[in-house]
Amino acid sequence: MAFSLPNEAETGEHLKRGPLRDFGLRKPGDSSSAKRHTLNFHDFPVPRLLAYSLRLAGLKTGGPGEKVEWWATFTYKGVGATLAHEKFGLRLYLPADLTENASKGLLTEIQTQLRSATRAVEKVLLAVAPEMLGLGHATVVNQHFALDRAYAYFRSRALDPTLIEDEYKEYGVDELPKGLARTSTFQSGKVLMQLNAFHDMIAAITAYLSRLEHDLVLAMAFSDFDPDSDNLTSFIGSRWGEKFDRVLHKAHGAHQYRRQLTAVVERWRNPYSHGGFEKGHAATIYLQAPGIGAVPVGLTKVKDSPRFSFLPATESTIEEVFRLFDELDAWIHTVLAEAMQWIASGLDVRFDPDFRALVEEAREREEFGELVSYFEHRQAIVDNMDY
């Protein structure tokens, strides 16, 4: 589906009359010795907005070139200048024969007007951003490895908790801590290690689900995403189970893994993600039953609650959870082989029609690996600005 930004002509006229009113076309061949000034990326965090603003105002831009993504030539109040996004920064080139005070003054004025121009363009983009995102005219940043590091960190701690030694203390009569009647205390290192392992398991489950949701969003571009019926914004905001069903519902074994993962989530993660309250309240709320007294809402089912025992999860339980995750990962890599190959490359994922057409063509030719390699090579060029 073709998509164009609205009001480009009107925005361009606004820029010419307002923020960029002092900018003009530079004559061909008009060049002189220039001094480089590096602009702060904090002031211009999205350099492409600058190039787009200048183009809308009718100014000339070029690129890419060696170690430069784009450049723009213009005059400011009659003074020739060049703005360029280079590998090591955003640079403004002003005539070298200007006095220091004149150069500083022009630098300040140009930056002020460029900031105003980008704000005007931002309003246009923000107005259509929800529609563009929903239709898939977007690139989703690949955060798989960052999320996987969090999961791996908590998983390793859960499976191999830091050693804690037993601690036994004796107190003299005059040394007893306030409120302590006994003359000795004992703290089991093993019990503390088990509790720590349990807490890290909960964190690992949360991290795993975060990574899974992210991967499913990325995989949607390689699935049957249809902008006429799918809305990318809504899909990103949906629950993990809805993402799972949407992307994996046709795969053999999906129902089984969905059920097993749901069981893990409801038993272990959800109570600790929702204020400690379990589904159905189980052992977290007690009924004041006449003739009986306080009894848990879950009644005898309370035995299935993490709160039923002092140590909610044993070592074998923790291993069982991660065994399921390993099986699920292996299954996903099988049923979503191409999507996971792309995700493993670290490349961001586009949802636009042109990209989806390239993916479909590569599949038909059985050249998906070559497509990944091509984009990896192209990304390396972009990263290093080796145009």
Image (cartoon, rainbow, N blue to C red):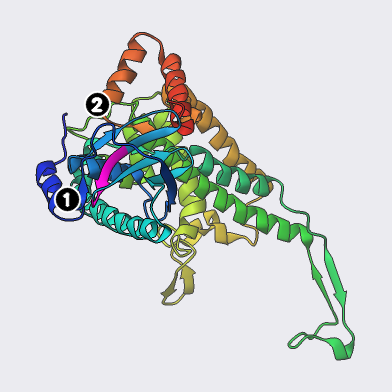
Residue drawn at (57%, 43%) of the image = 149
- Residue 184, percent from left and from top: 85, 78
Marks 2 and 1 in Cβ contact (< 8 Å): no
Front disc: 2 or 1: 1
Residue 80 shows in this picture = yes
Residue 193's image quarter? bottom right
* Classed neighbour count for the residue bearing mark 1: other residues with Cα under 10 Å, few (<14), some (14–19), many (≥20): many
Q: Amino acid at mark 2?
A: Pro
Left of 236 or right of it: where is 298?
Answer: right
Region rendered in magenta: 72-77
Numbered badge on residue 15: 1
Left of 179 or right of it: where is 1?
Answer: left
Residue drawn at (41%, 57%) of the image = 279
Residue 335 shows in this picture = no
Numbered badge on residue 353: 2
Taking depth in this image into account, of 147 and 126 the one nearest to the observer is 126
Left of 323 or right of it: where is 106?
Answer: left
Q: Amino acid at mark 1?
A: Leu
* Classed neighbour count for the residue bearing mark 2: other residues with Cα under 10 Å, few (<14), some (14–19), many (≥20): some
First-in-chain label (2 vs 1): 1
Q: CA distance from mark 2 to mark 1?
A: 31 Å
Quadrant of the image for the N terminus? top left
